[in-house]
Image (cartoon, helix red, strand yellow):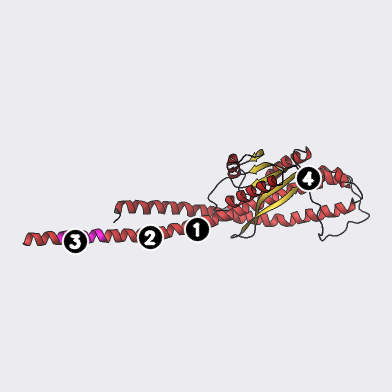
Amino acid sequence: MANLKAIRQRIRSVQNTQKITRAMRLVAAAKVRRAQMRTLAARPFTGRIVRLLQQVCEEVASIDLQGLPLLERREVKKVALIVLTSDRGLCGSYNTNVLKAAARRIQALRDEGKEVGLITVGLKAASFFKRIKVDKFKTFTLLPAVPSIQEAKLIAENASELYEKKEVDAVEIIGTDFVNMIRQDVVHTKYLPVDLPEGVDHYPLSSETIFEPTLMELMEEELLPKYVENVLYQALLEASASELAARMNAMSNASNNAKELIQALTLEYNKARQASITQELLEIVGGAEALNK
């Protein structure tokens, strides 16, 4: 029978672990609500940017849009992947799913004879790809739990610069899509060159509309950069909400498992204690009988 002291120590250890997992679940639950609200609030703005981009593109259809660097298409020889992970663990299979998808995409591109470079976001991605021989352009770590547009702008500028300087011929994003508190899907998004949206409901611009600056200047200096920044910002928000939801679920499961383990250990402790008491009684009875003989 197991030693009573060892069982008591293990019960205390599991109880302390349970306190930590409960605290982490509560913190994640408080943060995920704010992250979810910001993610859902940003989606209509992203849709509006897409509609506006289509409207302006239709107005400049007669002009060679290929003159705009972010729209320029060329033969794809090297691809940059932006991999979005977290800085911390304890969030279930969230990081593992993203990293597996990134590894599969890298292998698929290499099978097509293309080179691959990485822009990693999060310590988990940086740590994982240290073991894989692949070019690393930039690493971004220690982002806020709920990222702001400043972080998105910094990453977007880095990716756009690589594309405009023709260091890469395409940029893709490997991240997650926040569906609900239980489900977070890994998604693969083509980022650069910008795909002109099609089939989006919109209201045509008035023929009397006068633009200052010109439509081409508006596209190059304002609309396209804003579109690129917003797509990445939305991806960061989705990843943040997915991470926090995954952590909340993981810590909830860990707390439940700790509770079950404590119950099992308590039962084992009671059995051991009862066996010890029974053994002592038998020894006392045996000693008394020996004295009476």
- Which circle's residue, 2 or 3, is located before the other in the chain? 2
Q: Quadrant of residue 32?
A: bottom right
- Which circle's residue, 1 or 2, is located before the other in the chain? 1
Report how far apart the C-alphas of labels 3 and 1 lie in the structure: 42 Å
Report how far apart the C-alphas of labels 4 and 3 lie in the structure: 83 Å
Residue highlighted by disc 3:
281
Q: Which numbered tag is attached to residue 253? A: 1
Disc 1 crowd, CA 10 A, few/some/many (<14, 14-19, 20+): some
When the figure is inspected, residue 48 is found, relative to residue 120, above or below; the finding is below
The magenta segment is 275-284
Measured from the top left, where is residue 211 in percent x and y? 89, 48
Q: Nearer the viewer, residue 131 or 208?
A: 131
Mark 2–mark 3 contact, CB under 8 Å?
Answer: no
Q: Quadrant of residue 203?
A: bottom right
Report how far apart the C-alphas of labels 1 and 2 lie in the structure: 17 Å
Disc 2 crowd, CA 10 A, few/some/many (<14, 14-19, 20+): few
Residue highlighted by disc 4:
225
- Which circle's residue, 4 or 3, is located before the other in the chain? 4
User: Secondary structure of the magenta portion, mostly?
Assistant: helix
Measured from the top left, where is residue 263 in percent x and y? 39, 60
When the figure is inspected, residue 264 is found, relative to residue 107, above or below; the finding is below
Q: Residue type at mark 3: give it.
A: Leu
Q: Nearer the viewer, residue 135 or 41?
A: 135
Measured from the top left, where is residue 192 in percent x and y? 76, 46
Q: Residue type at mark 2: give it.
A: Ala
Judge whether residue 4 is colored magenta. no
- Which circle's residue, 3 or 1, is located before the other in the chain? 1
Residue highlighted by disc 2:
264
